Image (cartoon, rainbow, N blue to C red):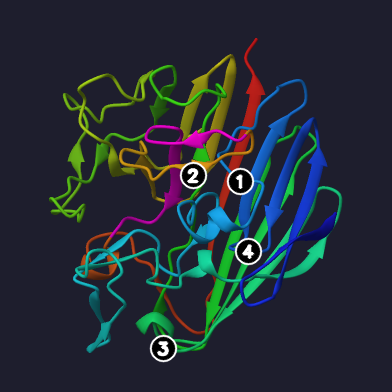
Amino acid sequence: MAEHFADTPEGLPVDVIRLQAGGTRAQILTWGATLQDLRLDGVDHGLVLGAPQLAPYLGPMRYFGAIVGPVANRIAGGTAELDGTRHDFEKNEAGRTTLHGGHIGTDARLWQLEEESDSHCRLSLRLADGEGGFPGNRVLSAEYRLGDDGALTLTLTAVSDAPTWMNLANHAYWNLTGRDGLEDHALSIAASSYLEVDDHLIPTGAPVPVAGTRFDFRAPRPVRREGEAMVDHNFCLDPGARPSLVLTGGGLRLEITTDAPGVQIFDATGLTPGPGHDGRQHGPHAGLAIEPQFWPDTPNHPDYPSIRLDPGATWSQVSRYHATVES
């Protein structure tokens, strides 16, 4: 149930909603519709990185567990064209790209709690036409629901009164062992191809096969090994694969199934330290960001799966996260 968590610097109240079902407990903040904590009965640590205070979410842990958007990931040059009109967005990444919607994306806003029960909550957010350079008056919704089996299902939807782009994503950092570092985590992804990127992490073109590359996770392998290149890439999910991704570590197993066409994986290289639930300062490689979404820079790639949202249509994404103790 919802209760007061903190106040923003402007004095606005932020609530935390506590959900429980099937041996799983989740905590959701109305700030950023953030998955603040997720725990299994009998396991002595949380499975997502988060903080017990609001302040870190306003600084070094800005994206941790939040719903990012309205267009997650990067837009090259902070600009794109829609129906012959050029739109310029806020360039909030080194002055050259738009990242996760700009300076004040969906992660840095107070969402409205619309409904709740012991096992689910639904939050909404309204974005005005032109905010951050994106067209359309938009209404977004994020519903978290725990099932009887303990799986957490996140349903994201959006509508708009004008043609626009939409690509929401949850930006949780996962750690199954309760210890910083990813060397003891194994990952498999149902993806035969991925997107190569340039020095600014912008896709360079069409998907390329993962075979023979550092990005081949079709069979379980360590998330990272010493000396390996950073992973901050989109994996193009094989249609119909269930689950889409499996992460294991510390005797736990996380299965993620999504209807999104891709998943961004970031191994937290260069992560700015932030205080966790247990007081530790989480640094580089403290968790693995797993972000089901459409592909990055899609507004500038007409050959990628479209994120166009027209009036009268509903954009949606459904992702299911099921953590269990391995037998």
Q: Residue at x 66, y 27 (%)?
A: 45
Q: Residue tagged by mark 1?
A: 51
Q: Earlier in the sequence, mark 4 or mark 3?
A: 4
Q: Residue tagged by mark 3?
A: 130
Q: Earlier in the sequence, mark 3 or mark 2?
A: 3
Mark 1: secondary structure: loop
Q: Residue tagged by mark 2?
A: 274
Q: Earlier in the sequence, mark 4 or mark 1?
A: 4
Cα distance in 3D space between marks 3 and 2: 32 Å
For the residues bearing labels 3 and 2, Cβ distance under 8 angstroms = no
Q: Residue at x 40, y 61 (%)?
A: 72
For the residues bearing labels 3 and 1, Cβ distance under 8 angstroms = no
- Look at the image and tell me whether residue 317 can be seen: no
Q: Amino acid at mark 1?
A: Ala
For the residues bearing labels 2 and 1, Cβ distance under 8 angstroms = yes
* Quarter containing the C terminus: top right
Residue 282 percent location from the top left of the image: 48, 36
Q: Quadrant of residue 276?
A: top right
Q: Earlier in the sequence, mark 2 or mark 4?
A: 4
Label 1 neighbourhood size at 10 Å, few (<14), some (14-19), many (20+)? Answer: many
Q: Amino acid at mark 3?
A: Gly
Q: Amino acid at mark 4?
A: Trp
- Viewer-nearest of discs 4 and 3: 4
Q: Residue at x 54, y 53 (%)?
A: 56
Q: Give the extent of the magenta segment.
A: 279-296
Q: Residue at x 62, y 14 (%)?
A: 326
Residue 94 percent location from the top left of the image: 22, 64
Mark 3: secondary structure: loop
Placement of 29 over or under 173, stated as above or below: below
Label 3 neighbourhood size at 10 Å, few (<14), some (14-19), many (20+)? Answer: few
